[in-house]
Amino acid sequence: MLIGSVTVPAAVLVLAGSRSGARLPVVAVTAVVGGVVGTVAAGNMEYSTLRTLGVLPMTFVGIIEEAAKLIVPVAVVLLTRPRDPRGGVVVGVASGMGFATLETMGYGFQALLKAGSVQAVDQTLLLRALLSPAGHVAWTGLTVAMLWRIPSARHKGRAVLTFLGAYVLAVALHATWDASQSLAAHVVVAVVSLVLLLVLVRRSHRGVGPGSPAPAGLRPASA
């Protein structure tokens, strides 16, 4: 279940981090701790909301999960004050990867308990893993990419507003994906999410040519 859940998100993380300004230890910690903290926090908040309201609207799911995935990246920003905004999308992809991996494993266990079939588990893992780059990975990559720009921005207020706008967009995409039963709507959300992610990854690689020295994120922390 772990291998089936993590392979595709991890491949996206490798692509995003191949030439970026994010430090490898930060990315690794965010992927593991961010996934665990985000999953636990989202589960607790969703359960509390369900008990309070009696229902759990899809908009609330988007708000809660997108916020939960930001807990560790926000802590990293406050502790490290990054000056290179290129690393933001990589850290966001790492946090989204950790969350998506654990969530997919949870759905895999549900499929096993419900159907009692390894084939059902395989189908669940395959579908959710293939869709993860257009879901949690892209949405968190977008918001954290904007978050990473705040410390080095000349106009802090504008940078904060851009981050909040990215968060609202991520919540909207998330809620639309969860609430819609239309294949066309899912395709539109997936395409928009993937395009945004690829644009941000491309920008994070800009200025680093094939012959350029590897950025700090790809060297050991002591280098």
Image (cartoon, rainbow, N blue to C red):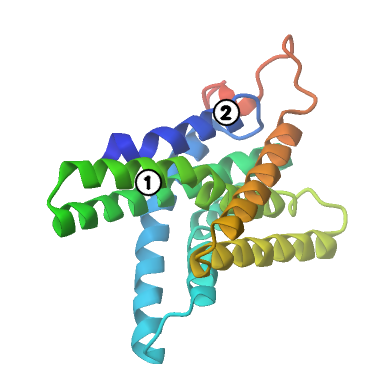
Residue at screen point 68% across, 63% down = 169
Is disc 2 surrounded by few (<14), some (14 to 19) or many (20+) residues within 10 Å? some
Who's the residue at 69% across and 43% down the image? 195
Which residue in the structure is indicated by mark 1? 101
Q: In this rendering, is residue 171 above or below 136? A: below
Quadrant (top left, top right, bottom left, bottom right) of the C terminus: top right
Q: Which amino acid does the dot numbered 2 rest on?
A: Leu
**Foreground residue among 164 and 214:** 164
Three-letter amino acid code of the residue under disc 1: Thr
Q: Residue furthest bottom?
A: 53
- For the question of whether residue 58 can be seen, the reply is yes
Determine the residue located farthest toward the top in the rendered image: 211
- Position of residue 217 relative to residue 145, above or below, is above
- The numbered disc on residue 127 is none
Residue 156, image x, y percentages: 81, 60
Q: Quadrant of the N terminus?
A: top left
Q: Is residue 84 visible?
A: no
Circles 1 and 2: CB atoms closer than 8 Å: no
Dot 1 or dot 2: first in sequence order is 2
Q: Is residue 109 left or right of residue 88?
A: left
Residue shown at the point (50%, 60%) measured from the top left = 71
Instruction: Looking at this view, name the residue that lies furthest to the left.
Output: 116
Q: CA distance from mark 1 to mark 2?
A: 17 Å
**Local secondary structure at mark 2:** helix
Give residue 126's quadrant in the image. top left
Q: Percent position (x, y) of residue 214?
A: 65, 18
Q: Which residue is mark 2?
A: 15
Q: Is residue 93 left or right of residue 35?
A: right
Is 166 in front, or is 80? 166
The number of callouts visible is 2
